[in-house]
Image (cartoon, helix red, strand yellow):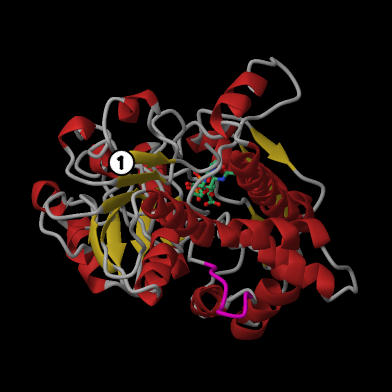
Amino acid sequence: MSKKVSIVGLGYVGLPLALLAAKKGFDVTGIDLDKNKISKINKKEDPIGDEYVAKNIRSTNLQAVDNFSEIKSCEIIIICVPTPVKDDFQPDLTLLKKAAEAVAKNLSSGSLVIIESTINPGVCDEVVIPIIEQASGLGINKDFYVSHCPERINPGDKEWSVENIPRVAGSSNAKGLELTIDFYKAILDANIMPMGSIKEAEAVKVTENSFRDVNIGFVNELAMSFTKLGIDVKNVINGAATKPFAFMAHYPSIGVGGHCIPVDPYYLIEYARGYGFEHEFLALARSINNKMPEFTVEQLSDGLNEVGLSIKGTNILVLGLSYKANVADDRESPSYKVIEILKTKGANVSTFDPYLKQKSTEPDLNSALVGKDAIILAANHKEFLGIDIAKLKIKVYVDGKNAYDKSVFAKTNIVYKGIGR
Ligand code: SAJ
């Protein structure tokens, strides 16, 4: 008889995981409060525009519901709800707390609760376990176990998916860890590393995402300095990347978006501040990366000045609203910051994103390209890289993703501006 598993939160993290567990023979119930999403899933339609989901949803037996009663009969419950930050960059655990409470009210003795949502060190011990004990009347490690196995979903990644990304896990005790490792070994085509504690597992996730934000901050600062030094930062990074050890290439751009990289460092910053430690490095990387939309608009201003124009009153097309290429996700997207700055400077701003047509001001790419003075490439979707630059009737092109070979523009009268090149 296959083990019964519930997955709470059927977004970019929870839905691929639910499909994988069902594919591997577990009896899976997906739980989400979004009725529209539930009905799509039960009609075998992909509700989130995810390649892995689209590939597997028709062939996998997954039941989706919007209530928590199924949890009573489940041995494993996995919580995959969003953990954003508030406007003041404080961690927002509202959805996680609500999910933990709803799970607890239906929890049976002997169950394992796994948190996949990204959280700062201490959240399981200090927030999740007390909520579950309070609402269930059960005792940790006596009647139930709690583990943290941080998700590592990389939206739009063709090589790495929920099936083959290695994982780490920490648990409330050895028994909980054993049950957790057994579960992931049963579904993953990858390794899972047991950590010494839940707190270590929580710290792994904010560390790897902060590592990325700091390295992006470093190259974004290089880009700002190299613009003044007249050095092409992309060529330099590609050159450095020829070194087969001790260098990992990151690239400067219009800014850092998504619900992970620009968010997770704040978790560690705020948690450590509570213990009297200031993470200067993380805070610095955040402030540099948050400057990139403004820096991008400065490149536009410089380019327009070269052709005797200024931003005020010019027609600017922003190509891409998503936070990165080939995904339909615009959470924390730097595009919106660029648009806001352009509007405050009096530009007439149009937008087009083939993945987010409903949020675009232009209906399609062809009409978007008409009647514009300048373009800012904000997301290097594959649909944009096919544009025939020679046919563009614009004066300035700001390549916010350094996606183009500059020589393409050399044959035109268009002023090309990159990020650090
Ligand atoms: N970016 C740069 N320069 C780079 C790399 C990225 O400017 O060299 C920008 C991107 O354009 C984007 C942002 O950073 O705006 C984040 O993009 P991403 O591809 O780095 O990250 P996400 O948010 O799509 O996914 C990340 C991944 N984490 C890491 O790579 C360490 C993924 O593995 C995590 O699972 C995911 O966060 C998450 O859910 O935490």
Q: Residue at label 1?
A: 381
Quarter of the image for the N terminus: give it.
Answer: top left
Residue at the outermost front position: 308
Which residues fall within the magenta stretch? 83-89
Name the residue located 27 percent from the left edge and 63 percent from the top edge.
Answer: 314
Crowding around mark 1 (Cα neighbors within 10 Å: few <14, some 14 to 19, many 20+) is many
From the top left corner, tell me how far across and down residue 85 is, in percent.
57, 72
Name the residue located 79 percent from the left edge and 56 percent from the top edge.
Answer: 281
From the top left corner, tell me how far across and down residue 77 is, in percent.
51, 60
From the top left corner, tell me how far across and down residue 160 is, in percent.
47, 32
Q: How many marks?
A: 1
Above or below 311: residue 201: above
**Picture quadrant of residue 68:** bottom left
Q: Answer whether residue 26 is visible to the viewer in this image.
A: no
Camera-side residue of 30 and 93: 93
Name the residue located 63 percent from the left edge and 43 percent from the top edge.
Answer: 228
> Mainly helix, strand or loop, the magenta region?
loop
Of helix, strand and loop, which one carries label 1?
loop
Camera-side residue of 74 and 313: 313
* Beta carbon at label 1 within 8 Å of ligand 1: no
Residue 85 inside the magenta-drawn segment? yes
Amino acid carrying mark 1 in the image: His
Name the residue located 65 percent from the left edge and 38 percent from the top edge.
Answer: 229
From the top left corner, tell me how far across and down residue 304 is, in percent.
37, 53
Q: Is residue 80 left or right of residue 391?
A: right
**Picture quadrant of residue 326:** top left
Above or below 91: residue 258: above
Above or below 370: residue 88: below
Residue 359 inside the magenta-drawn segment? no
Q: Is residue 157 left or right of residue 220?
A: left
Camera-side residue of 202 and 415: 415
**Picture quadrant of residue 273:** bottom right
